């Protein structure tokens, strides 16, 4: 490999952000940002095209010394678990730029710079193979996200930005201590692969598991540390919500997959029932909260809590179906919920209200919009033929195999999902056109279709033919499971 | 002392001699400087520091004990001296316009700063409690005067008076500790002390002496329970002097603390427990009290208390990594703190004081570049990667966990979350408020250069810490 493809993927948005700082007109800023994200997406497609699905080994690896005195390296690489998320991040990056085209009308340059910096950091998180590097990317994301929520958000943006920042920071610092303990106990290296190969005593694993749990549970978010999410989602601008729901929430689950499971296998097995119970709680509680919402964005935000519960359930089912389903469902949730936030953003730009009660009969005034919305709603409630069906089915199969009660709770959550999503769609799109907003709504234009079309493609592609996606993750999941259970049974 | 030994001693202390002679010459020449010629003073002072710096560099290759064991020119001292040089030169550059505005730009201002610098340099090199005392007093006497330099302002006078009284008390405590050490061991040399008491390190008399010495030193770095002077002095002093004091004398205090504490005598006497308690309380107090401050200088005073607490965690950790982590912390702190003070100094223009946090509302709208560097300093102070502030904290935590003090590390990071709140609150004011008035910062080329230099340091050390880390690790004495 002559070309450092992953470095290109990670640093293209960062370089793009630097270039943007020298541009003057808003138009040039928008087009440049779009060009950068599309170029980045092209690199990701090239990466996936060259991805070898037959091995669990890290691919496209690059290792450079960074701080040799502490054993820190600049190491990048992807395997079956991270490849999909690198791609998802790049895809949503382009969607975010399109979603912010007219929605962001002041400080456009600063916004696009923050967005691109954010994207570079997110891509870095998914491709880092060094714990220190991972932590730097992970934590540095707070800066652009704080600004995106706090500067361009809604009326309660400052409160939401503070809450997001402090919640995440408090979770992350314990993770940092965990990382350092791991470093000291694991032979003074931050190399993720080397640390995975270490066999730590159960006591250390236990402590580390909870230190990591705090950080990842806040990001996922799992009940009871989910309360930052509705505020952040509702107040963030559309692109911010898409990033939060599409990518940031995945990072918590990715953390479980990359660190908790492989590095702390015995603790993960030991506490899996606890984690399953918390997941079931999130599924049902999130669903009930979503059922009670009148605000469109809040509804989608709470549904995310419920859906991410499925993901953590699949992970801690610790069997093949559960894990594959969880990873696929992470990808699906990024696509579908990203799209739903995009749709809420689009309609909010037109009417400046997010209250479900203000809407009605959108099907008549905006048929294209309503048709696409129907697709994503059905996807979100996991109708057969859409992406989430495949993922959720796998997760449920895994969940039932692991624990009957938890599986049953998940079914209840799925029913709740159908209730609040269909209820919302019925009120918003069907029925008589509402008086308040009837005349102001125009249907989607070409730019908006361009933003939603790729997402729709993935909804149907994964729904109808998931094999290529499962192929990518298959080898790595098999390896991970063998590792967890191998260590667990005392080999 | 033979002639050769004297000559070698003079060579070893050449940088100090350069600074002191330079200060004396400047004091005389300064009388002939006309109005509107004050920039001569700045450049002459900078030149003196640069000469001392090159002398230091030339001597850095080997360890040179001098003055019969009172003084040593080793790599540890060289590292700290460079921190002092950076702090002093940047203070000079920031002072030019500010002293004009405040009307305090006489030659004494620069001379006193140079003499304070020489005091700090002696502290970094001192290996005897008496030479530590000489350096310490030289430094603090100068800063007492500089604190009261705004003669027309009550706040400044009050601050200076408080500083003198409290400082004198702490010096007295320190000297009492020294006298106890001398009475019990018959020496004041750090090495001699250790050799004299290897038998029973927990002699209660010695422990008392150590506690007194600790108390005296802790005053200088502004740690609890001797922190009360910090907010008043920081608020009342001219802002340039506040910037200087928050970096230079603090680093000098830590240099002495490291030398004293890592002496085998002290290391054997479980003093780390005291240091750990002081560190926790200091950081907690600094972080929590800063939450409710509206005055920017006062807020930074409490922030500097919190940072002193964090650096003390490194002292508590001890060992080669612990020492190196404190040294790296102080170097990085010099960059980010001088940077943020530079922006406050720059805002002082016309009738705009820039001392209240709310004064900065909406700065990002009219001055995006300035807002960006402030953002950088603030996130660095909060310890968010990829800034240097994160790496500084990270290395201290590594040293703590390595020694097995995981609980201390957890306390340290949780308190730094509290501290993050007031830094991001300032970012919020800068970025998320609408501007209420026009900004007219005094952006002279010198101030621009200072801000650029500190900003590059703040982000540069964060992205490429390897070289600086090695520098700190190589400068640790004896390890």
Image (cartoon, coloured by chain):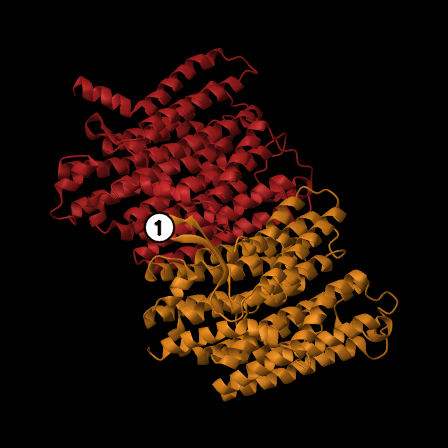
In screen coordinates, is B10 left or right of A240? left
- State whether residue A21 appears in this view: yes
User: Is B167 above or below relative to A479?
Assistant: above
Residue at the spot 75% in from the left edge and 44% down from the top edge: A25
Instruction: Look at mark 1 in the image and give the residue it sits on.
Output: B313
| Res A299 → quadrant | bottom right
Q: Position of residue B103 (x, y in %)?
A: 55, 23
Q: Residue at x 53, y 39 (%)?
A: B455
Q: Position of residue A471 (x, y in %)?
A: 56, 74
Determine the residue positioned at 57% across, 45% down: B375
Q: Secondary structure at mark 1?
A: helix
Give above or below for B307 relative to A164: above
Across and down, in percent, residue B424 comes to 55, 51
Q: Colour of chain A?
A: orange
Q: Chain of mark 1?
A: B
Check the rendered structure and report the hue given to chain B: red
Q: Position of residue A47 (x, y in %)?
A: 58, 61
**Other-residue count near label 1 (Cα within 10 Å), few / some / many at <14 / 14–19 / ≥20:** many
């Amino acid at each position: 490999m002559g070309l450092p493809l992953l470095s290109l993927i990670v640093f293209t948005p960062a370089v793009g952000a630097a270039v943007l700082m020298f541009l003057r007109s808003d138009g040039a800023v928008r087009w440049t940002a779009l060009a950068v994200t599309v170029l980045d997406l092209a690199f990701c497609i090239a990466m996936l095209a060259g991805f070898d699905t037959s091995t669990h080994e890290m691919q496209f690896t690059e290792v450079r010394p960074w701080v040799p005195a502490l054993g820190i390296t600049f190491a990048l690489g992807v395997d079956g678990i991270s490849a999909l998320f690198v791609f998802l991040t790049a895809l949503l990056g382009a969607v975010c730029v399109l979603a912010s085209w007219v929605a962001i009308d002041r400080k456009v340059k600063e916004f696009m710079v923050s967005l691109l910096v954010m994207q570079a950091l997110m891509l870095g998180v998914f491709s880092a193979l060094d714990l220190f590097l991972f932590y730097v990317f992970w934590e540095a994301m707070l800066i652009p996200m704080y600004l995106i929520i706090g500067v361009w958000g809604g009326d309660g943006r400052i409160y939401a930005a503070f809450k997001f920042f402090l919640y995440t920071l408090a979770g992350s610092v314990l993770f940092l201590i965990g990382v350092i303990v791991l470093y000291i106990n694991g032979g003074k290296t931050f190399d993720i692969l080397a640390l995975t190969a270490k066999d730590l005593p159960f006591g250390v694993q236990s402590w580390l598991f909870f230190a990591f749990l705090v950080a990842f549970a806040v990001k996922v978010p799992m009940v009871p540390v989910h309360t930052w999410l509705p505020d952040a989602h509702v107040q963030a601008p559309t692109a911010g919500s898409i990033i939060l729901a599409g990518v940031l929430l995945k990072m918590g689950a990715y953390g479980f997959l990359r660190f908790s499971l492989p590095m702390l296998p015995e603790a993960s097995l030991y506490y899996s029932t606890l984690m399953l119970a918390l997941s079931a709680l999130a599924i049902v509680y999130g669903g009930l909260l979503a059922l009670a919402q009148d605000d469109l964005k809040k509804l989608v935000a709470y549904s995310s809590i419920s859906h991410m519960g499925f993901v953590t359930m699949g992970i801690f089912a610790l069997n093949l179906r559960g894990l594959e389903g969880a990873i696929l469902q992470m990808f699906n949730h990024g696509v579908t919920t990203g799209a739903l936030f995009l749709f809420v953003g689009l309609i909010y730009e037109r009417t400046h209200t997010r209250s479900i009660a203000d809407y009605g009969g959108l099907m008549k005034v905006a048929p294209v919009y309503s048709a696409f919305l129907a697709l994503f709603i059905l996807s979100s409630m996991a109708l057969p033929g859409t992406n989430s069906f495949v993922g959720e089915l796998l997760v449920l199969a895994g969940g039932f195999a692991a624990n009957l009660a938890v599986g049953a709770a998940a079914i209840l959550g799925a029913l709740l999902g159908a209730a609040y999503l269909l209820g919302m769609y019925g009120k918003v799109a069907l029925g008589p056109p509402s008086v308040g907003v009837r005349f102001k709504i125009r249907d989607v234009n070409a730019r908006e279709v361009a933003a939603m079309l790729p997402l729709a493609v993935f909804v149907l592609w994964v729904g109808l033919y998931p094999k290529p996606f499962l192929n990518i993750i298959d080898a790595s999941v098999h390896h991970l499971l063998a590792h967890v259970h191998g260590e667990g049974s005392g080999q | 002392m033979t002639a050769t030994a004297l000559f070698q001693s003079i060579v070893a202390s050449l940088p100090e001699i350069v600074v002191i002679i330079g200060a004396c010459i400047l004091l005389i020449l300064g009388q002939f400087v006309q109005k509107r010629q004050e920039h001569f003073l700045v450049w002459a002072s900078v030149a003196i520091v640069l000469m001392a710096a090159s002398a230091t560099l030339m001597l850095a290759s080997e360890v040179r004990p001098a003055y019969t064991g009172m003084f040593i020119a080793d790599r540890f001292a060289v590292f700290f001296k460079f921190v002092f040089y950076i702090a002093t030169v940047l203070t000079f550059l920031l002072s030019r316009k500010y002293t004009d505005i405040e009307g305090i730009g006489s030659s004494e201002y620069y001379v006193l700063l140079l003499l304070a610098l020489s005091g700090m340099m002696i502290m970094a090199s001192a290996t005897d409690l008496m030479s530590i005392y000489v350096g310490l007093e030289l430094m603090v006497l100068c800063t007492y005067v500089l604190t009261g330099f705004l003669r027309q302002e009550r706040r400044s006078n009050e601050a200076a008076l408080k500083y003198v009284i409290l400082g004198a008390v702490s010096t007295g405590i320190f000297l009492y500790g020294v006298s106890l050490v001398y009475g019990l061991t018959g020496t004041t040399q750090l090495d001699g002390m250790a050799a004299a008491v290897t038998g029973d390190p927990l002699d209660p008399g010695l422990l008392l002496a150590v506690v007194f010495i600790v108390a005296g030193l802790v005053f200088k770095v502004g740690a609890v329970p001797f922190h009360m002077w910090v907010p008043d002095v920081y608020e009342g002093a001219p802002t340039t002097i506040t910037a200087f004091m928050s970096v230079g004398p603090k680093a000098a205090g830590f240099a002495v603390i490291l030398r004293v504490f890592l002496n085998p005598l002290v290391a054997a006497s479980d003093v780390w427990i005291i240091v750990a308690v002081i560190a926790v309380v200091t950081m907690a107090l600094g972080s929590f009290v800063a939450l409710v401050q509206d005055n920017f200088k006062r807020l930074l005073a409490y922030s500097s208390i919190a940072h002193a607490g964090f650096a003390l965690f490194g002292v508590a950790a001890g060992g080669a990594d612990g020492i190196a982590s404190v040294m790296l912390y102080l170097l990085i702190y010099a960059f980010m703190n001088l940077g943020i003070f530079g922006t406050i100094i720059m805002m002082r223009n016309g009738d705009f004081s820039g001392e209240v946090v709310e004064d900065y509302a909406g700065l990002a709208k009219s001055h995006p570049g300035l807002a960006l560097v402030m953002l950088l300093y603030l996130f660095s102070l909060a310890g968010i990667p990829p800034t240097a502030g994160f790496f500084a904290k990270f290395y201290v935590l590594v040293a703590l966990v390595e020694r097995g003090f995981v609980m201390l590390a957890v306390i340290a990071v949780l308190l730094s979350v509290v501290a993050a709140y007031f830094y991001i609150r300032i970012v919020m004011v800068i970025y998320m408020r609408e501007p209420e008035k026009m900004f007219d910062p005094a952006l002279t080329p010198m101030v621009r250069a200072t801000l650029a230099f500190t900003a590059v340091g703040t982000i540069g050390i964060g992205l490429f810490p390897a070289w600086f880390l090695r520098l700190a690790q190589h400068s640790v004495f004896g390890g």
